[in-house]
Image (spheres, helix red, strand yellow):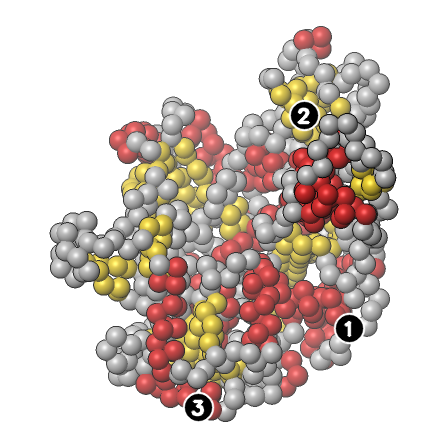
C-alpha cells in the first residue's frame, strides 16, 4: 500500500534533465497516448527546446500535442526523424510533474503516455487565448441582393445595444445561429471590434483574519505552519472528531502557503462536499478558489488548466484528477476526508489519489495534510510507525457535544408490514418535528427498490450488460442498472411466464423510505438527496441552502449527505439499515461501514442543541455496531488491525488484482487460464484464481480475476510486469492491473 515513503516501490529512474535542445538535435517527446515511452523528433532550425516544453509533433497523418521529455535515443538517423512542428507558448511542465508522471506510471504499471494524458487533459488550453472580439453595426446599408430576414434584424438590434458582445453571445441573445452573425459580418453590416479584457478575478487574501480558534485548533494550526516553514516533505494526519473544526485549522496552513507565494491543492472526494466548504473558504479568504471537477464547462477547464500552469491560480480545490494539473510551484497538498473510497480511480489508470498525493508531496519535497474524523487503517498504521505525524482535535468546536447513539434491534422492534422505520425511530421523528428541529434518514441505496421480481414465477429483472439486478426508480418511471446506466420501463408482463401486472418491488431504496415518510408525516417538508436526484453542483448547493434555511424538516438520502455538511437545527439522524455493507468479501467492509456510519452520525447536534442517532440493525452484536454505540473508534480499529495483521492483508501485506475482460467469454477464460498457468512460483507469492469476478459481466464484457498476495517486503510491480510480458494476450482481451485494490467487484 502506498502512503509513506518507506512503502513506495522504487520509482522508474527519470531521464536526467537535458540542456536546451539546439537545432539539429533530437528530443524524446512523450505523447498523451497509451504509449510506454517517448518518441524521437528532430529539433528544426529556429526552435530551441528545453525539457517540459509543450510541443506539437506529427504522428502519422495528424498532429498531436506532447511534452519534451528527454534526449532522443538515437535509434534512427537524424535525417529520418520528423521535425517538431511547433512549441506552445507556455511555461515548461515542471520537472517534479514529469517525475510524478513517470512515478505513477511505474507504480500502477500504466503506459507513461496514458498518465500524461491526465496531465494534459485539456489540449485546447495549450493554445494561446485569442483576443476577445465583439460585433457592432457599421451603419451601412445592405448590399444588393442581401435579404434582411427577421433573424438578421434581431441580431442588428442586439448589436446596437450596450455592451458589445461576441458573435456567440450575440447569436444567443437574438435567438439564432452563429451563421446569421457571420453573414452580417461578411455583408459589411457588422464589424469586428476588440473587446476589453475581462477583469481578473479576485485572489484569495491570505492576510485576512480568520475566526477565533480554540486552544486545540490554534496549536494544531501553528504546528502545520511550522511544518510549512521547514520547507520539506512531511505527511501529517489531522485527526479530529466530527465538528471539531478541522477545516479552519488547515485554512491556517493554506494562508501560510499563499503568503509564501506558492500554490495549494485541496482534494475533496466528491463535488457534493464543496458547497458549504466553498462558502467557508470565501468568508475566510475573501474570494473563491479555482475549482476542478467533471462538471466544469470546457471553457472553465481550459482557463483553469492554463492559469494553473502559468501560476496565475494560487489555490485549486478539486476531485482526484486535480492531482495531475501542471502546477507551476505547488507548496502544499491537503486531502480532506482522506479515508473516502471515492479517491480510488477504477478505470483507465487505476490509482488511489490519497496515496498518489503522498507520492507527489514526497517527490516535490512539500508537506501534505491528510484530514479525517475516521482515518483509514493505512494512514493510522503509518502514524504508529512514525512515518506520519498526528495532530488531534478531541472535542467539537464551540462547546457542542457528540450525539447520543442508540441501537434499535430490529429483531425486537419490528417495523409494521411493508414498512421500514421501526417504532422507536418513528417516535423519535415525531418528537423532533414537534420541537421544530430537523431530522435526517439515511439509507445508502438509491432508487425505490433494489430488486424487482415476478410474484408468479420468481423471475428477476436483470441488466443485459452486467451481472446486476435492475433498480427501480419510481420517480423517473424506469428500471436502471447502476453499473452501466442501462434503463428501461417496467414491463407490463413478465418476460418469463407472461403474467401481467405481476412484478413486486423487493426491499427499500430512498424513494420508498420517502414514500413511507410522506404517509407518516404528511405535514413535514421533505426531500430526497441522492446522486441521481441532484443534477450537478448547483442542485446540491440549492438543496443545502434549503436545509440550512429550514425550508425542509426531514431529509432522506444516501452517502451524498453523509459528510461535510453543518446544519445547526439537525438533531436526529436515523439509519434505516446499519448492517448494509457488512456482508460480501470486501476486506474493508467493516472499516468502510464504520467510517460511513460515523460520518452520518456526525451530522447530528453540531450546534447548541444536543443530537441523537438511531441505528436500526439486525446484528446489534456486530463489532462495528458495538463500536459506534460505545463511541470507541480506537478499540474497533485495533481489533480490525489485528485481524488484518493475522491474515497478512493490507496494510500489513500487499495485494494486486489482475482483471481479464473481453466480449467473448471463452476467449477471456482461455487467456485467464494461460495467465494463471504462468503465475510466478515463490514461497512468498500466493496467486488466487482465475475465477469469475463478483461482477462477472460488466458493460457487456466478461470478467475473470486473479489476486496476488505477498508480504510487504515484496515489490509486486516488476514481478507482475515480467509475468505478463511472457503471456500472449490478444488485442480483443484487456488485462487491467490494480495495485492495492479497493473494490473487489
Name the side, left or right, on which 482 lies relative to 341: left
Name the side, left or right, on which 281 lies relative to 46: left
At horizontal 23% and vertical 63% (from top left) the residue drawn is 504
Confirm or deny contact between disc 3 and disc 1 (CB under 8 A): no
Position of residue 171 relative to residue 532, above or below, is above
Residue 583 appearing in the image: no
| Tally of numbered discs | 3
Name the side, left or right, on which 201 lies relative to 118: right
Where residue 736 appears, as percent x and y from the top left, is: 43, 37
Tell us which disc is closer to us: 3 or 1. Answer: 3
At horizontal 50% and vertical 91% (from top left) the residue drawn is 435
Distance Cα–Cα, label 2 vs label 3? 67 Å
Badge 1 is on which residue? 210
First in sequence, mark 2 or 3: give its number.
Answer: 2
Distance Cα–Cα, label 1 vs label 2? 46 Å
* 690 or 660, nearer to the observer: 660
At horizontal 25% and vertical 53% (from top left) the residue drawn is 491
Badge 3 is on which residue? 431
Residue 451 appearing in the image: yes
First in sequence, mark 1 or 2: give its number.
Answer: 2
- Residue 29, disc: 2
* 318 or 355, nearer to the observer: 318
Q: Quadrant of residue 558?
A: bottom left
Element type where label 3 sits in the image: helix
Amino acid at each position: 500500500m502506498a502512503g509513506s515513503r518507506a512503502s513506495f516501490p522504487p520509482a522508474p529512474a527519470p531521464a536526467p534533465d537535458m540542456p536546451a535542445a539546439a537545432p539539429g538535435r533530437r528530443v524524446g517527446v512523450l505523447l498523451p497516448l497509451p504509449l510506454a515511452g517517448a518518441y524521437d523528433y528532430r529539433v528544426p532550425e529556429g526552435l530551441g527546446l528545453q525539457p517540459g516544453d509543450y510541443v506539437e509533433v506529427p504522428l502519422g497523418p495528424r498532429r498531436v500535442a506532447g511534452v519534451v521529455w528527454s534526449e532522443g535515443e538515437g535509434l534512427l538517423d537524424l535525417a529520418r526523424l520528423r521535425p517538431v512542428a511547433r512549441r506552445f507558448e507556455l511555461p515548461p511542465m515542471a520537472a517534479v510533474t514529469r517525475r510524478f508522471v513517470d512515478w505513477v506510471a511505474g507504480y500502477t504499471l500504466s503506459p507513461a503516455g496514458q498518465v500524461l494524458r491526465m496531465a494534459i487533459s485539456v489540449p485546447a488550453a495549450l493554445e494561446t487565448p485569442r483576443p476577445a472580439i465583439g460585433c457592432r453595426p457599421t451603419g451601412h446599408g445592405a448590399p444588393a441582393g442581401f435579404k434582411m430576414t427577421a433573424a438578421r434584424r434581431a441580431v442588428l438590434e442586439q448589436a446596437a445595444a450596450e455592451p458589445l458582445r461576441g458573435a456567440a453571445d450575440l447569436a444567443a441573445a437574438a435567438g439564432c445561429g452563429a451563421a446569421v452573425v457571420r453573414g452580417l459580418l461578411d455583408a459589411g453590416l457588422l464589424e469586428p471590434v476588440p473587446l476589453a479584457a475581462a477583469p481578473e478575478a479576485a485572489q484569495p487574501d491570505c492576510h485576512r483574519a480568520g475566526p477565533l480558534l480554540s486552544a486545540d485548533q490554534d496549536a494544531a494550526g501553528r504546528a502545520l505552519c511550522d511544518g510549512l516553514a521547514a520547507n520539506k516533505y512531511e505527511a501529517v494526519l489531522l485527526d479530529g472528531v466530527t465538528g471539531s473544526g478541522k477545516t479552519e485549522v488547515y485554512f491556517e496552513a493554506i494562508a501560510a502557503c499563499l503568503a509564501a507565494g506558492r500554490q495549494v491543492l485541496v482534494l475533496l472526494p466528491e463535488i457534493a462536499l464543496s458547497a458549504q466548504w466553498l462558502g467557508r473558504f470565501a468568508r475566510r479568504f475573501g474570494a473563491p478558489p479555482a475549482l476542478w471537477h467533471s462538471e466544469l464547462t470546457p471553457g472553465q477547464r481550459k482557463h483553469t488548466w492554463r492559469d494553473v500552469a502559468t501560476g496565475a491560480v494560487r489555490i485549486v480545490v478539486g476531485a482526484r484528477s486535480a492531482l495531475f494539473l501542471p502546477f507551476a510551484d505547488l507548496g502544499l497538498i491537503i486531502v480532506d476526508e482522506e479515508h473516502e473510497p471515492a479517491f480510488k480511480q477504477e478505470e483507465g489508470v487505476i490509482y488511489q489519489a490519497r496515496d498518489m498525493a503522498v507520492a507527489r508531496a514526497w517527490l516535490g519535497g512539500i508537506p501534505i495534510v491528510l484530514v479525517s474524523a475516521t482515518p483509514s487503517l493505512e494512514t493510522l498504521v503509518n502514524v504508529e510507525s512514525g512515518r506520519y505525524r498526528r495532530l488531534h482535535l478531541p472535542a467539537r468546536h464551540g462547546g457542542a457535544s457528540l450525539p447520543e447513539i442508540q441501537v434499535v434491534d430490529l429483531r425486537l422492534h419490528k417495523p409494521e408490514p411493508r414498512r421500514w422505520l421501526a417504532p422507536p425511530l418513528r417516535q423519535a421523528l415525531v418528537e423532533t418535528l414537534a420541537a421544530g428541529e430537523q431530522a435526517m434518514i439515511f439509507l445508502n441505496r438509491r432508487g425505490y427498490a433494489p430488486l424487482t421480481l415476478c410474484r408468479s414465477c420468481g423471475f428477476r429483472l436483470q441488466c443485459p450488460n452486467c451481472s446486476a439486478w435492475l433498480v427501480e426508480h419510481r420517480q423517473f418511471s424506469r428500471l436502471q442498472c447502476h453499473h452501466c446506466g442501462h434503463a428501461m420501463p417496467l414491463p407490463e408482463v413478465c418476460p418469463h411466464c407472461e403474467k401481467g401486472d405481476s412484478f413486486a418491488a423487493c426491499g427499500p431504496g430512498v424513494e420508498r423510505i420517502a414514500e413511507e415518510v410522506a404517509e407518516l408525516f404528511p405535514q413535514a417538508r421533505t426531500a430526497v438527496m441522492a446522486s441521481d436526484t441532484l443534477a450537478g453542483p448547483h442542485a446540491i448547493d440549492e438543496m443545502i441552502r434549503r436545509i440550512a434555511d429550514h425550508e425542509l424538516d426531514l431529509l432522506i438520502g444516501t452517502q451524498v449527505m453523509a459528510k461535510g455538511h453543518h446544519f445547526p437545527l439537525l438533531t436526529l439522524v436515523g439509519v434505516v439499515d446499519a448492517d448494509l455493507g457488512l456482508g460480501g468479501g470486501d476486506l474493508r467492509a467493516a472499516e468502510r461501514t464504520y467510517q460511513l456510519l460515523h460520518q452520518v452520525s456526525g451530522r447530528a447536534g453540531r450546534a447548541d442543541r444536543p443530537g441523537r442517532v438511531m441505528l436500526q440493525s439486525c446484528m446489534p452484536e456486530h463489532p462495528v455496531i458495538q463500536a459506534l454505540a460505545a463511541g470507541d473508534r480506537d478499540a474497533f480499529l485495533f481489533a480490525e488491525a489485528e485481524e488484518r495483521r493475522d491474515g497478512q492483508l493490507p496494510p500489513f501485506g500487499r495485494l494486486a488484482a489482475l482483471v481479464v475482460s473481453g466480449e467473448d467469454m471463452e476467449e477471456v477464460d482461455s487467456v485467464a487460464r494461460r495467465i494463471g498457468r504462468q503465475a510466478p512460483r515463490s514461497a512468498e507469492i500466493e496467486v488466487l484464481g482465475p475465477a469469475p469476478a463478483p461482477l462477472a459481466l460488466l458493460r457487456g464484457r466478461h470478467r475473470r480475476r486473479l489476486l496476488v498476495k505477498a508480504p510487504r517486503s515484496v515489490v509486486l510491480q516488476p514481478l507482475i510486469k515480467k509475468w505478463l510480458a511472457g503471456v500472449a494476450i490478444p488485442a480483443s482481451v484487456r488485462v487491467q492491473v490494480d495495485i492495492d485494490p479497493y473494490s473487489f467487484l
